[in-house]
Image: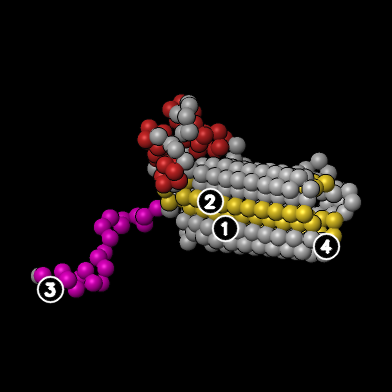
Amino acid sequence: MPQVHPSAVISPSAQLGRDVIVGPFCVIEDDVIVGDGCRLASHVSIKSGTALGAYNEVCEAAVLGGKPQHLWAGTELGPLLIGNDNIIREYVTIHRGLTAGTCTTIGEGNMIMVNAHIAHDCQIGNYTVIVNNVMIAGHVTVQDRVYFGGAAGIHQFARVGQLAMIGGQSHLSQDVPPFVIVDGKSNLVCGLNVIGLRRAGFSNDEIRDLKAAYRVIYRSGLTWNDTLEVLANTFQEGPAAEFHRFLTESERGVVQERKTPRGATIPLPAEEDRVRLRKVA
């Protein structure tokens, strides 16, 4: 049986699974499903059209299934579907689909931290980490195991490939290929997420192929069509093949690489090193 605090307000039509805990001052509206073992802290609001899977933890003042922040948002909205084992921290907001027949989906095992916002019609994969104050606009697709640094912002309709790592305070308006790191200062790609790949169990051979494919995309100087052709012919299986699949579906273009300024070959020594060198001379 659910454990419901007496101050909570729950619609008679809401469905609560086994061992659900509902804290003080929560509001659960009509047409809501809360799966087995979910834990709702105080002041959580779950709006109509929202379904949670099992064993989700929802912290204080989160609002799930709110109306999209869009001028076209009417009364006929799509649902918000949330999978299992997610941690949704304080003040997170996640909105429903913009129109009937659309949907916002959150996968499994995600951690969504304080004050993050996920807009209407987003598709969030599994085991992502979305850090404090991240802003994800409408219709964004985020694949599995992506990491967002704090206060990153993602433009509507953009895509972020699997195991990408987005630096804090990034502001991105194009697609981020899988497996790469985006520098939060320049908003540009600065290499492969090698540490993340190793933690995810990728083999040395797979990482070697990913490095080779990365060089084709960012270091070869090929045109876009030639790049796609080389990727398709050279990397036909394994994780490196994901680059071709992802790039061929891009409609916004992809984030470019951060490059060393032309002509800069040897970096100048730091001031303390220059002092030391003068003393030696």
**Quarter where residue 115 is shown:** bottom right
Q: In the shown orientation, is residue 21 left or right of residue 216?
A: right
Picture layout, residue 68 above or below residue 209? below
Q: Which residue occupies 55% across, 54% down?
A: 148
Task: Please tell me the numbered disc located at residue 6.
Answer: 4
Marks 4 and 2, how far apart in space? 38 Å
SS at badge 1: loop
Query: Would residue 56 be visible to someone looking at this image?
Result: yes
Marks 3 and 2, how far apart in space? 46 Å
Instruction: Say which label, 3 or 4, has the lower sequence index.
Output: 4
Instruction: Say which label, 1 or 4, has the lower sequence index.
Output: 4
Circle 3/circle 2 CB separation < 8 Å: no
Q: Which residues are magenta?
A: 259-280
SS at badge 4: loop
Residue type marked 4: Pro
The residue that mark 2 highlights is 147
Q: Nearer the viewer, mark 3 or mark 2?
A: 2
Instruction: Find out whether residue 89 is within the magenta segment.
Output: no
**Quarter where residue 150 is shown:** bottom right
Quarter that holds the C terminus: bottom left
Instruction: Say which label, 1 or 3, has the lower sequence index.
Output: 1
Q: In the shown orientation, is residue 263 left or right of residue 240?
A: left
Circle 2/circle 1 CB separation < 8 Å: yes
Residue 276's x, y, as percent?
17, 71
Label 4: how many Cα within 10 Å (few below 14, some 14–19, many 20+): few
The residue that mark 3 highlights is 279
Marks 2 and 1, how far apart in space? 8 Å
**Quarter where residue 29 is shown:** bottom right
Q: Which residue occupies 41% across, 47% down?
A: 195
Q: Nearer the viewer, mark 1 or mark 3?
A: 1
Instruction: Say which label, 3 or 2, has the lower sequence index.
Output: 2
